[in-house]
Image (cartoon, coloured by chain):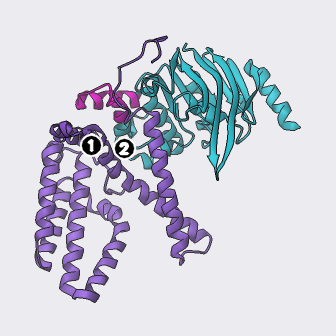
Chain colours: A cyan, B purple
Amino acid sequence: MAHIELDGVEVTATTTGADVSILRDITASLTERRIALIGANGSGKSTFARLLNGLVTASSGHVRIDGVDVAEHGSAVRRRVGFVFTNPASQLVMPTAVEDVALSLRRDVKDARQRDVRARAVLERFGLGHRADTSVHALSGGQQQLLAVAGVLATHPDVVVADEPTTLLDLANTRLIGDLLLGLDQQVVLATHDLDLAARCDRALVIADGRIDFDGPAGDAVAHYREQSRR
Amino acid sequence: MRAVSLGVHHPGSSPLHRIPAGPKLALLIGYGIVVVALRGPWPATTAAGVSLLLAVSAGVPLRELWRGLRPMLLIVAVLAGFQVWQRGWPAAVEVAATVLALVVAATTFTATTPTDRLLDAITRGLGPFRRFGVRPEKVALSFSLMIAAIPRIAAIAAETRDAARARGLERSPRAYLTPLAIRTVAQAHATGEALHARGLGDDEGPRDLAPGAPQA
């Protein structure tokens, strides 16, 4: 598994002229295979997830993946860290399913025919082979999220970071995507409101008001979060 | 049944499908120049007919093409109405037929050309301009994104119109256009973020950094 390090990370944003702290005093060393980030809306867990892929850069402190600084080597890190968004419609940028996966493969597979074959093979693997030439807008929400995950996994990243990947899905698709992510060979970091999914991870961090409020075994973290939420 | 609109690939094996993307793009550009240069309602109407024949020859069902074109007919109607007012009926027919000929030809082009191949063709075509600082990969990606954005923006427009209707504001241009503009910009931002997350458009650096590699 990759070694994800966050060392004294702070993230601030400027809103209407004032600096707003989003994350502060974040120090953690993540080596487990399944890691959950849980917390209330606006707690900072999505920002935490985005730090790992370089979508957000730390205002101070360092984020490193196996010693490689995300801020300094963003391009190299993004080759190793895939990112799944909450809303797959944001992630799918090509007109059809097969073209979207092929777009992910462009960097590594130069031959167009080979790219097409590889993209179709990826879609078959995820049960979307019959929808390869379908417009991404014509896919169901579950199929869109499945396609988004397929597009990320097509490039074989070492780490998959997912930001509330099941929030917009129905029960059956929540289970499908959850099982898929937790069953991957890759290291998975999952920001989620789904406490059942979080409890199945090896470790969970509870984020509250931009800080790590609890860090430990997933079951204990979920229990802590439930307790905090009742207050 | 799905609509065939600009930007959506419609797989097939027609002669148009078999023409490589680069020469086909050059043909489209040439055809577009000829259509725009034509004067008078009859030549323009003939061009619209030729475009329709090309679409049919590519196996694009007319009913699906009609469904895809319907949203833009409003714009054509407004344009034609303005021309009737300013220059009379012949000019209105010429403008409307020219626009339709171009849009149907472009739709047929995207229906018969995978976006991936188009990206390759543009990248190859712009290769010689690399020495002048042009980044062919980024230009090609921008071009493809522009085409892919058309059905997406059409979907946003339909959702926004429904939202305005649901609030009884279907007659208010402000209730339609303001959220449409904001949502379109938000979508562009989300697309940029998605490309960034997928490492597309990143400068080509070393293939990989070994774990623990010394930091710069």
Residue A77 in the image: state x and y as whole percent.
47, 23
Asked whether B185 or B113 is in front, the reply is: B185
Type of amino acid at the residue the image marks with label 1: Pro
Q: Is residue B66 magenta?
A: no
Tell me, yes or no, if residue A125 can be seen here.
Answer: yes
- The correct choice, above or below, for A39 with respect to A185 in the image is below
Q: Is residue A109 magenta?
A: yes
Q: Residue B195: percent from the left, percent from the top?
A: 42, 38
Query: Badge 1 local density, few (<14 within 10 Å), some, or many (20+)?
Result: many
Q: Would you identify the image quadrant in which residue A199 lies?
A: top right
For the residue pair A59 and B187, the one nearer the viewer reads as A59
Q: Is residue B134 above or below residue A125?
A: below
Residue A201 visible from this viewpoint: no
* Label 1 close to label 2 by CB (< 8 Å): yes
Regarding mark 2 in the picture, which secondary structure is present there? loop
Q: Quadrant of the C terminus of chain A?
A: top right
Residue B151: numbered disc: none
Position of B1 compared to A182: left or right? Answer: left
Dots 1 and 2 on the same chain: no
- The CA distance from mark 1 to mark 2 is 9 Å
- Residue located 19% across and 53% down the image: B58
Residue A179 drawn above or below residue B175? above
- A15 and B88: which is toward the camera: A15
Which kind of residue does numbered mark 2 sit on? Thr
Is residue A191 left or right of B192 when viewed as pictured? right
Residue with the mark numbered 2: A96
Q: Which residue is mark 1?
A: B114
Residue A8 sits above or below residue B48 on the image: above
Residue at the (57%, 33%) spot, across then down:
A50
The residues colored magenta run A102-124
Q: Residue at x 19, y 64 (%)?
A: B52
Q: Main secondary structure of the magenta part?
A: helix
